[in-house]
């Protein structure tokens, strides 16, 4: 039970719309209960005008609750409750309610209006109510009030209401700042969880997630999805002879070369693990994927990182790239794309490394423009 409750809380933090909907639903329910209790009290005490007012407000709160639960009309409910509350408080102010006590409920308007309308609109509505209050008590318009308030009450009550407005402003500001800070922290943790710490590009976890998402998107459009599997040639030899720190620098350089080529927002580049990288190219055929692979290979060679313990003739850091392209349909799964790209990479390494090999429709196509070892 506790775990489920925590899951709901976590989802509310991440999903702003869900949080607002749940809060407004609870608040509408609470206001309905309060209004219903006041309606029953006024009914039994035979206070006709307050019975009508509180009864009407309880009905509006119930309607608002149903609108939120059934149709999720958040904006309509916000204005409905806020405006109705203001009208009700104005009537309390005019009539005095029971023994002049009812206007005290006006102190709840700032927090209520900010809750439903937000800080800006709630403040405007509260200031309007404060303006009405001051005009009613501190100007000749006080003669039109239906209740004879004491002079002490007429002086002190507006000050108390202004104090409640300032307090509500302070609390709402703190709430907003706290919430924004919490969201920033959660976003940062989310980015860290999806980022490879060394190369600062996405990690395997993020890649798997995006592959699933892109697969569904491309399948709906019956399009093509290409993948590059990239491996740094003879990287173990480099680590053994140049050291792991130098090896880390190579991985960072390769990641930089990949990102210099992958420029579309829909493309995904990630560190697959160890010295391997992976790239997703949605709605891209084998020709476009091969061109991207060639550019990545050239960008890595342009780094001119010496490697005297490689099988490649250039004696520098190079990459082998396996390219796979599939027409996404119901008959194949994402694992098929992974398998094809891995097979293409294996072929590129077997054929001498430092080259691009494409797997398309079960046909091997070696890129003749890529240099190969002798």
Image (cartoon, helix red, strand yellow):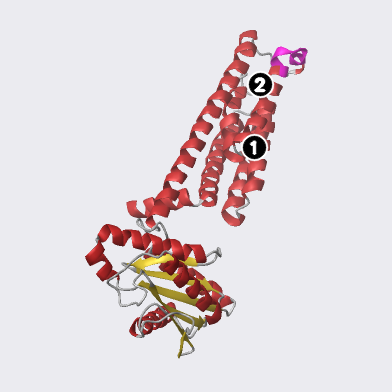
Give percent across and percent down for residue 107. Answer: 58, 25
Quadrant in the picture for residue 155 = top right
Q: Is residue 27 magenta?
A: no
Which-is-in-front pick, marks 1 and 2? Answer: 1
What residue is at 65 percent from the left and 28 percent from the top?
89
Furthest-bottom residue in this view: 363
- Cα distance between the residues tagged 1 and 2: 20 Å
Provide the residue designation for mark 1.
Answer: 82
Residue 44 location, quadrant: top right
The quadrant of the image that shows the N terminus is: bottom left
Tell me where the magenta segment starts and ends, as one range: 135-143
Against 204, residue 174 (above or below) is above
Q: Specify few, some or many for label 1: CA neighbours under 10 Å numbering under 14, 14-19, or 20 or more.
A: many
- How packed mark 2 is, by other alpha carbons closer than 10 Å (few <14, some 14-19, many 20 or more), is many
Instruction: Answer yes or no: is residue 192 visible.
Output: yes
**Mark 1 or 2, nearer chain start:** 1
How many marks are shown on the rendered structure? Answer: 2
Where residue 317 sits, quadrant-wise, is bottom left
Could you say whether the residue bearing mark 1 is in a helix, strand or loop? helix
């Amino acid at each position: 039970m506790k775990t489920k409750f925590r899951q709901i809380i976590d989802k509310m933090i991440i999903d702003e719309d869900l949080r607002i909907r749940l809060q407004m639903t609870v608040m509408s329910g609470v206001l309905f209960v309060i209004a219903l209790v006041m309606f029953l009290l006024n009914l039994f005490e035979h206070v006709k005008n307050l019975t009508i007012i509180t009864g009407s407000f309880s009905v509006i709160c119930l309607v608002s609750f149903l609108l939120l639960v059934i149709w999720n009309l958040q904006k309509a409910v916000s204005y409905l409750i806020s405006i109705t509350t203001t009208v009700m408080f104005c009537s309390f102010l005019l009539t005095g309610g029971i023994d002049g006590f009812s206007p005290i409920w006006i102190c709840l308007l700032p927090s209520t209006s900010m809750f439903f309308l937000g800080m800006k609109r709630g403040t405007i509505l509260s200031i309007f109510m404060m303006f009405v209050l001051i005009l009613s008590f501190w100007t000749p318009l006080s003669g039109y009030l239906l209740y004879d308030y004491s002079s002490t009450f007429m002086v002190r009550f507006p000050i108390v209401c202004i104090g409640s407005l300032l307090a509500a402003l302070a609390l709402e500001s703190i709430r907003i700042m706290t919430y924004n800070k919490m969201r920033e922290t959660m976003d940062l943790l989310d980015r860290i969880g999806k980022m490879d710490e060394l190369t600062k590009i996405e990690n395997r976890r993020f890649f798997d997630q995006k592959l699933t998402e892109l697969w569904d998107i491309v399948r709906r459009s019956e399009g093509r999805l290409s993948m590059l599997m990239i491996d740094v040639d003879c990287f173990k030899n480099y680590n053994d002879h140049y050291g792991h720190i130098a090896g880390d620098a190579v991985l960072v350089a390769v990641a930089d070369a990949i990102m210099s080529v992958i420029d579309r927002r829909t493309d995904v580049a990630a560190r697959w693990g160890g010295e391997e990288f992976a790239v997703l190219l949605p709605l891209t055929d084998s020709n476009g994927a091969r061109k991207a692979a060639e550019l990545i290979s050239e960008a890595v060679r342009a780094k001119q990182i010496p490697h005297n313990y490689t099988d490649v003739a250039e004696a520098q850091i190079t990459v082998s790239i396996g390219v796979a392209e599939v027409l996404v349909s119901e008959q194949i799964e994402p694992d098929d794309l992974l398998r094809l790209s891995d097979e293409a990479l294996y072929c590129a390494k077997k054929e001498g490394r430092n080259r691009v090999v494409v797997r398309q429709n079960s046909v091997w196509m070696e890129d003749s423009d890529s240099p190969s070892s002798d």
